[in-house]
Image: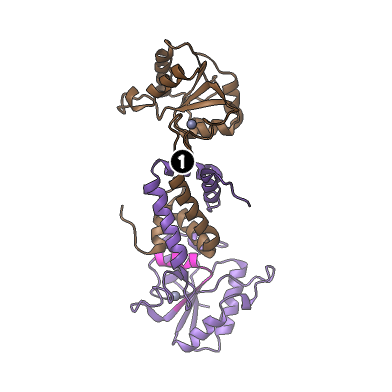
Chain colours: A brown, B purple
Amino acid sequence: MSLPNDPIERLIALLARTPGLGRRSARRAVLRMLMKPEETMLPLAEALTAAAEAVRPCQVCGNLDAQSPCGICTDPRRDRHLVCVVEGVADLWALERAHAHHGLYHVLGGTLSPLAGIGPEELSIQPLLRRVEQEGVTEVIIALPATVDGTATAHYLTDRLKPADVAVTRLAQGVPMGGALDVLDEGTLAAALRARRPV
Amino acid sequence: MSLPNDPIERLIALLARTPGLGRRSARRAVLRMLMKPEETMLPLAEALTAAAEAVRPCQVCGNLDAQSPCGICTDPRRDRHLVCVVEGVADLWALERAHAHHGLYHVLGGTLSPLAGIGPEELSIQPLLRRVEQEGVTEVIIALPATVDGTATAHYLTDRLKPADVAVTRLAQGVPMGGALDVLDEGTLAAALRARRPV
Ligand SMILES: [Zn+2]
Ligand SMILES: [Zn+2]
């Protein structure tokens, strides 16, 4: 999509691409920001640039952070024997906001989906198996969405983890069917994690 | 409000200040943008900086534009005898989107509001009178909101414009009571402008 040259129209068009903001909201936001550009637009521009330059995927777990390995992977207070497998970074952040998990994470990067052509090679499964084998992991908590693909992926992971000497658990029922994790309230997430059970 | 130092949290906090975006939407937007930072975050940062640096109020009409006098004030196809008075730039932009007005504008910067301590000196009224006297304006269209303050301001302007040799009209009924102009659909705005009548 080509962008207008006029700086106001260009900014509206780019801001309107933000998920959750339509064109009308983007126009209002720009107008409001133009009332105090130094206090609103320049700090936001700097924060965007800083984040774009600093943030990268953690080479260990797949989290997004300004350092790699990320702040969670390098936190000495974390239980390194416990790894929680999530579909994406949004779910990792949701679990962190729930303060429910004191171990590490592993971001799978999606779920298996034969229809969408997503097989095991497209996901971060080999790195997970390697971590479990080499890093003394004693429990893998599977925190994937309760969708068809999420459930199938959980079964697949359980099979692949069988040869390893590791407990495999999943979030307790309480996660709504077909629901995304990152829209759940923190209490529900924390309760589901506490009541996790063996697969 | 102090901002977090972590680049991701800082960006979320700043983006969450955007009118229309809550904290949850800001978090999702940032996560989505971090998937393709070069394509999403850097262009947005550049557009914000460019707009903050280039855009200023038009010294003639009060519109916001990358040039002053603005693109409307300098457009030779515009009817310079016709000036439409609006409360703010949002209303000017709404009328422009309706393609209903082929004259110039004058942004008042608000409406008279004794309760809020906004008197004639706080608004761009003297500059309007000067334009009418010195620039051959033959009609002033008052396009203020149909609120108590907007109506009172329209009456005040009509009084102040009496000595000048100028027709004073206002938008036809059709603008909903108490409604802001910039949320109206373009057809309603265009019809109200076409059916304008003398005050
Ligand atoms: Zn990590
Ligand atoms: Zn102008």
Instruction: Please provide percent x and percent y for residue B179.
Output: 54, 61
Between A167 and A31, the one lying in front of the other is A167
Residue displayed at 50% across by 34% down: A70
Residue denoted by label 1: B31
Residue displayed at 40% across by 81% down: B80
The residue at label 1 has a CB less than 8 Å from ligand 1: no
Residue B17 within the magenta-colored segment of the rendering: no
B44 shown above or below A176: below
Callout count: 1
Instruction: Please provide percent x and percent y for residue A164.
Output: 44, 12
**Quadrant of the rendered image containing residue A78:** top right
Instruction: Please provide percent x and percent y for residue B57.
Output: 49, 72
The answer for which chain carries disc 1 is B
Residue A184 in view in this figure: no
B51 shown above or below A156: below
B12 shown above or below B79: above
Between B2 and B65, the one lying in front of the other is B2
> What segment is highlighted magenta in the picture?
B83-98
Residue A144 in view in this figure: yes
As helix, strand or loop, the secondary structure at mark 1 comes to helix
Between A52 and B122, the one lying in front of the other is A52
B131 shown above or below A145: below
Instruction: Please provide percent x and percent y for residue B145.
Output: 55, 67
The quadrant where ligand 2 appears is bottom left
Residue displayed at 56% across by 80% down: B158
Q: The residue under label 1 is which amino acid type?
A: Leu
Residue displayed at 34% across by 25% down: A113
Please rate how many residues cluster around mark 1, counting C-alpha atoms within 10 Å: few if below 14, some from 14 to 19, many from 20: some
Left or right placement of residue B38 versus residue A40 in this view: left
